Amino acid sequence: MKDVCYNLLQQSLDIIIKKYNTTLQSSNIKIVISNPVDQNLGDYSCNVSLQLAKHLKDSPLNIAHNLIDNLPSHPMIEKIEIGGIGFINFFVSHNAKTDLIESILNLKNDYGRLKIGEGQKILLEFVSANPTGPLHVGHGRGAAFGSSLASVFKFAGFAVECEYYVNDAGRQMDILSISVWLRYLDLCGEKNINFPKNAYQGDYIWDIAATLHREYNDRFSIESNKLPKFDSNSDDIESQMDELIFFCKDFLQTRNFDIVFQTALKTILNDIKKDLSLFGVEYNNWFSEKILFAGNHIDKIIKKLNINKRTYKKDGALWFSSTKMGDTKDRVLIKDNKQLTYFATDIAYHVDKYQRDYDQIINIWGADHHGYMARMRAAIASLGEDESKFKIILVQFASLYRGEIQLPMTTRGGEFVTLKELRNEIGTEAARFFYLMRKCDQHMKFDLKLAKQKTQDNPVYYIQYAHARICSILKKAKQENKIYSSNDNIQQYFHLLEQKTEKDLIASLEKFPQQINMIVNTTHLHKLCYYLQQLAKLLHIFYNSTPILSCDRNDTRYARLALISAVAIVLKNGLKLLGLKAAEKM
RNA sequence: GCGCCCGUAGCUCAUUUGGAUAGAGCAUCGGCCUUCUAAGCCGAGGGUAAGAGGUUCGAGUCCUCUCGGGCGCGCCA
């Protein structure tokens, strides 16, 4: 319908623009059809006369009159009015609106599906938390956002792959292994194990150590007095840790160290996978950082940067001159100890993404990574890749509160709230919705106390309740044989849907595909939550004001049953995109 | 100190990327179940959009400055 209004206005604009003494081309004017703030003003609205006022040196009202006078008539447009200071408001005929219901009933799960993606390939990377501990509530927002964004893109006709980058190489993983090993030694009966402050403290380390002990007994054991001394209170705990890592690798040898390492990695990664799956998040790829080190992959990339004159040596290290590409400072690629930085492998990872030939590469990062955007873009551009394919979406932190008290969210320290705990406490459905209903670049307060308390008041139940209500009515309609038969041409009854509540519902149903389109363009997923809340509200209002089953006229009842069936379809489709179920009973 | 994000009702957040009278939920107060799900509906109060300038037909939205909050500024990952 928007297209109809657009085309009519375009035709009229071409005509009237010739009447004004102007060099303006109609193609330079952007005609945007929107919805008026108040439905009494019309079904669609356009502000083009306001835009034109300056160029044509005429009042918006005059221009609006001119536009309307030259507007071709159209069977679906009932009337056109000028509103406010010059808005052109379209009123669509009732029949044109109610046609939508039948189209929704036919399309079912596919109503709202778009083809705008044209099969374009998108790689969407999100969460990618280090596998050094369980996911916590801080990861939940990215997980919910990424998976739902993927759903929406797919629904809009894109071919989306979801990917998790597994940081299974590097020092943090060594520290994890050390942490497990020390706990394991404790379980072997060694007394006075000195557990470093900068090792991983969480209880899950004990669990992994227990697995290790169960499966390998004392195979990796050593007397505690032979371990290097460790003083957690000194200033150089990091270098002490490095010594400890060196000692451990030397003592266990590659084969045994690897067993400890793999046991830790596998346990944690499986836990993460299971966690995400139960949170409604599924990945296509789990990309291992380790495989980037195979071959001379990274060498090649650094050489290429070299050829492009983007690197230099300083203080024994190899630097990337990212300042030339807009970064605030240059970055090290190879440290003076010849080891690669995290950044270097990250470049290699992104080169790998480019080699896999996607139309769009989207990263969802926590807002704490914003400092990395400039260097990553600099690297991509310096390697001659198409930067326009690359997009980073920052998801702001959800700061966690329990009442007034803010909770720490570190996996190193003792207390943190895991995603699993959150699921157990408030459920996947409520948790996902809670995360998604806020604009992702908005700082968000996640109050656990509130989230738990609010289980009853959570908007997700409000929406699901609307769906369950409809299901219940439809079920009863069938039982009492009050529903139309499939042979009926139900379209003939739709003209009876003349109440305001019914018209509001139809208007809302029509907006669903527009929401999908808008989210693809803006990634403003939260608006889908608001949209569904609005639709649910209209349904509840309708329900409370209008008899459906108890309506004694068959034709009116049929029309209303068809209407709420369409509402149920849209609610279900929308909830599914958010990763939520549409309950049939509550 | 520099950079990024943000500041809207008592609280949590919207405002369709610059449009018409800034809206929801929670909380507070008052109504509605003998009838299709009361996890619902109806009504009331609540605003200098942090503040000050600027841009234009028009600003919560864009620009500048000030104030306030979060995050980032390693040869850590």
Image (spheres, coloured by chain):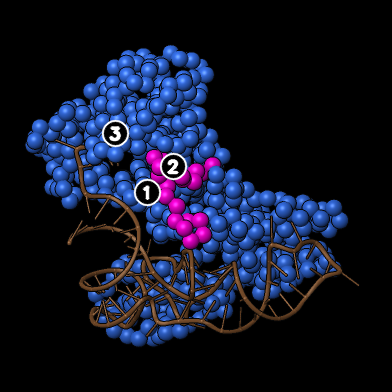
Q: Colour of chain B?
A: brown
**Under tag 3, what secondary structure?**
loop
Residue depicted at 37% across the width and 79% down the height: A50
Identify which residue, B70 or B36, lies in the foreground: B70
Task: Give me the chain letter of mark 3.
Answer: A
Alpha carbons under labels 1 and 3: distance apart: 33 Å
Task: Give me the chain letter of mark 2.
Answer: A
- Determine the image quadrant of residue A230: top left
Q: Residues within 10 Å of mark 2 (few under 14, many from 20)?
A: few
Alpha carbons under labels 2 and 1: distance apart: 22 Å
- Rendered location of residue A10, percent (x, y): 40, 69
**Under tag 2, what secondary structure?**
loop
Of badges 2 and 1, the one in the foreground is 2
- Rendered location of residue A428, percent (x, y): 57, 47
Identify which residue, A503 or A88, lies in the foreground: A503
Identify which residue, A188 or A39, lies in the foreground: A188
- Rendered location of residue A334, percent (x, y): 17, 32
Task: Report how many numbered discs are placed on residues in the image.
Answer: 3
Label 2 sits on residue: A414
Q: Residues within 10 Å of mark 1 (few under 14, many from 20)?
A: many
Name the main secondary structure of what is drawn in magenta. loop
Report the magenta residues as a range.
A401-420
Of pointers 3 and 2, the one earlier in the residue sequence: 3
Of badges 3 and 2, the one in the foreground is 3
Label 3 sits on residue: A231
Of pointers 2 and 1, the one earlier in the residue sequence: 1
Q: Check residue A408 for magenta coloring.
A: yes
Label 1 sits on residue: A366
Q: Colour of chain A?
A: blue
Tell me the number on the disc at residue A375: none
